[in-house]
Amino acid sequence: MSFQRRTSEKTTELTASVPVKLLTAGSAACFADFITFPLDTAKVRLQIQGEQPVRTVAMAPALNTSASLKLNPTPVPATQHVQYRGLVGTLTTITRQEGFRTLYNGLSAGLQRQLCFCSIRLGLYDTVKTFYGSLLKENEAGLQIGTRILAGLTTGGAAVMIAQPTDVVKVRFQAATRSSTGRRYASTLEAYRTIHREEGVRGLWKGAMPNVGRNAIVNVAEIVCYDVVKDCLLLYAHMPNDIRCHFSAAVVAGLAATIVASPVDVVKTRYMNSPRGQYRGAIDCAIRMGAKEGVAAFYKGFAPSFARLVSWNIVMWISYEQLKLVVFNRS
């Protein structure tokens, strides 16, 4: 009976055309992004905190010592001010200092990103999974882990190459504080134009390689993990295919995505937000960040990342599953 339920569900998913799948996935992702966007802004602020060059102050030469003969006293690192502390503290600080609307800076670019990005990585997942399934000849009665992983890597990587400019603009809007100079854009359209004019086409695709790696990993962690956990709940736990099942699978998917993607996500955010010439590349950014701030820097913003990815997955998957019941059966 459980296998029949799973087979019936797959049949229902495949009744929709590819354009309908793309639109349904993009709509669910946009709704999830709107609900959880403040958490993403907090995550970005925590991730870039500490990347500014260390300020130095000159030592005052001591009297009657050899230090008084030095023309260039050794600089001493100044203590850096930590502006954001924790998820709640970051949200509170941003709201108090810059206003609530700042939490939604870059929302339009974020929604554009989801329409481009999630439409492909999720909307094409079933189609690509079917294609790889026919090539690999995996047992359809099994979990088809290899087929799902390949499909997740493919759709995640392809989506980034198309949606990368929207991600760059979104990160820069979220990273910009009210006191920052030279980084404020009046609109997303102006941001695209300015980045293209000042940094060229490469500026719009800045950080594409770490982003491809990050989102291919996230895609596997989110979509494949959700897919597998959901099937296991249906097959072995005999859980009905309803919101309880979708909620449980989404929480596991969000946790897995946060753990595996956080280091790449921090590097991607730092590199995308950096001025031209600050880093030679994403690898250079990662090396310098690790040397300067330690291994813990790669998990900066973990709490908001976890809160954001878990809540985003819950809202997105429940919305997507409900939309499928309405849209797919009518397409």
Image (cartoon, grey):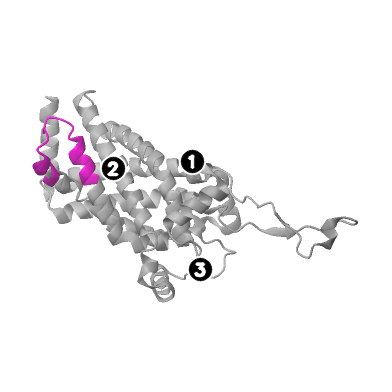
Residue range of the region highlighted in magenta in the rendering: 131-152
Q: Which residue is drawn at 34% across and 60% down?
A: 164
> Residue 68 in the image: x percent, y percent?
85, 60
> Residue 247 in the image: x percent, y percent?
32, 35
Mark 1 is on which residue type? Answer: Ala
Q: What element carries label 2?
A: helix
Question: Is residue 135 shown in magenta?
Answer: yes
Sequence-wise first label, 1 or 3? 3
Instruction: Give the CA distance from mark 3 to mark 2.
Output: 34 Å
In the figure, is residue 236 to the left or right of 288? left
Q: What element carries label 1?
A: helix
Q: Which residue is drawn at 38% across and 73% down?
A: 200
Q: Mark 3 points at which residue?
A: 184
Nearer to the camera, 289 or 178? 289
Q: Which of marks 3 and 2 is in front?
A: 2
Sequence-wise first label, 3 or 2? 3
Residue 2 falls in image quadrant = top left
Q: Is mark 3 on a helix, strand or loop?
A: loop
Q: Mark 1 points at which residue?
A: 303
Nearer to the camera, 16 or 212? 212
Q: Which mark is residue 220?
A: 2
Mark 3 is on which residue type? Answer: Arg
Q: In which quarter of the image is the N terminus?
A: top left
Instruction: Give the CA distance from mark 1 to mark 3.
Output: 27 Å
In terms of secondary structure, what is the magenta stretch mainly?
A: helix
